[in-house]
Amino acid sequence: MAKPITVREAISQALMEEMERDERVFLLGEEIGVWGGTYAVTRGFYDKFGPERVRDTPIAEAAIVGAAIGAAMVGQRPVAELMTINFAFTAMDHIVNEMAKLRYMFGGQFKIPMVIRTVGGGGRQLGATHSQVPDAVFAHFPGLKVVAPGTPADAKGLLKAAIRSDDPIFFIENALLYQWRGEVPEGDYTVEIGKSKVQRPGKHVTVVSYSRGLQLSMQAADELAKEGIEIEVVDLRTLRPLDMGPIIESFKKTNRAVIVEEGWKSFGVGSEIATRIYEEAFDYVDAPIKRVAQTEVPLPYNRTLEQSALPQVPDIVKAVKEVL
C-alpha cells in the first residue's frame, strides 16, 4: 500500500523510523530540537527522544560535522543537519579531508557511518550567498556519496538507506520540494543508493535531471505531451556514485538528450553527464546535447530577477524542441 505525503513528511518519517529502529542513530544541528528544525522536519523529535539523541548545537558547522565524524568513528550513527548547503563551506576541511577520506586512509580499520542532511536551491529570495546549488562540488570527491532525491518516495527510501550505510553520505534536499506530494509505500523500505531511475517513459528525447529539476522536467513533459512529444525523464537520484546505465539505455532509444540542473552550467553535473554520453554512446548521437541550467550570476534577491536566472519549464520545452 502507498499513500500520498509530502517530501517533508517523508524525510521526517525516515528519521523517526530509523531512530526507533536503532538506538545508535542520533541527530545534531542548529535549532533541530526545541525549535523543531528550520523546515519543521524534526518537530516533536526532542520531546520523544530527548536531548541526548536530538542535540541542539551552537551555530558552528565545523563543530557539527567534526563531532559527527568522531561519533561515527566510535560506532554511533549520527545524522548531522546543516541548515543550508551554503553553510557547509565553513566545514569543508572536515567534509573533504576527513569524512570522505578517513576510511581509505586507515585501510578500512573503522567506518564512517554518518549522514549530513542539508538544504540547497534558490527561488526563496534568500540572496546570493544562501541560494546556491554547489552539488557538483561535493560530488567531485571520491569517498563521499552524494544523494539528491526528487520525489517523496525516494526521499524516504534513500534517507533510510543512507542512515543504515557504513559510508559517509551527503544528503541534499531542496526547500522548494518540501511541499511536493507523491505516493510513498507504507512500512519499512529502502531505496538503493547509486541507482538512477526512469520516472517517465518516452520515445522522442531523453531528459536527465534530479531534485527540483525533476519536478520541472515532469511539468515540461506534460506540456510537451499536448503537442505529441513524449520525453523520457531519467532521475539521477544519486550524484556519486553516478549511475549512467538507464541514461545510456534511454539515449540509445531516443538519440537525443536534454540535461536539466538548477546549478550553474559551467563545471556542473550536466557537463559530466553530457561528456559521458558522448564517450559511451557517441554513435547514437543525432543532435547536440542541450543543457538547461541557472544563469551564471550570483543569484539575485529581487524575485523577478531571481526567477529569470533560475531554469524554468519553458526553458526545458524550448531545449527539447531544439534537439528535435
Image (cartoon, grey):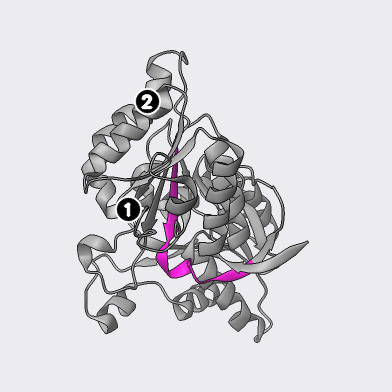
Q: The C terminus is located in which quarter?
A: bottom right
Amino acid on which disc 2 is placed: Lys
Q: Is residue 108 above or below residue 87?
A: above
Q: Which residue is tagged 1?
A: 85
Residue 141 location (% of width, % of height): 38, 35
Residue 96 location (% of width, % of height): 31, 33
User: SS for tag 1?
Assistant: helix
* Front residue of this view, candidates 28 and 101: 28
Q: Is residue 288 left or right of residue 38?
A: right
Q: Is residue 248 left or right of residue 42?
A: right
Q: Which residue is tagged 2?
A: 101
Corner quadrant of residue 4: bottom right
CA separation in Å, label 1 and label 2:
20 Å
Write down the region rendered in magenta: 168-182
Amino acid on which disc 1 is placed: Ile
* Front residue of this view, candidates 235 and 9: 9
Q: Is residue 279 left or right of residue 297?
A: right
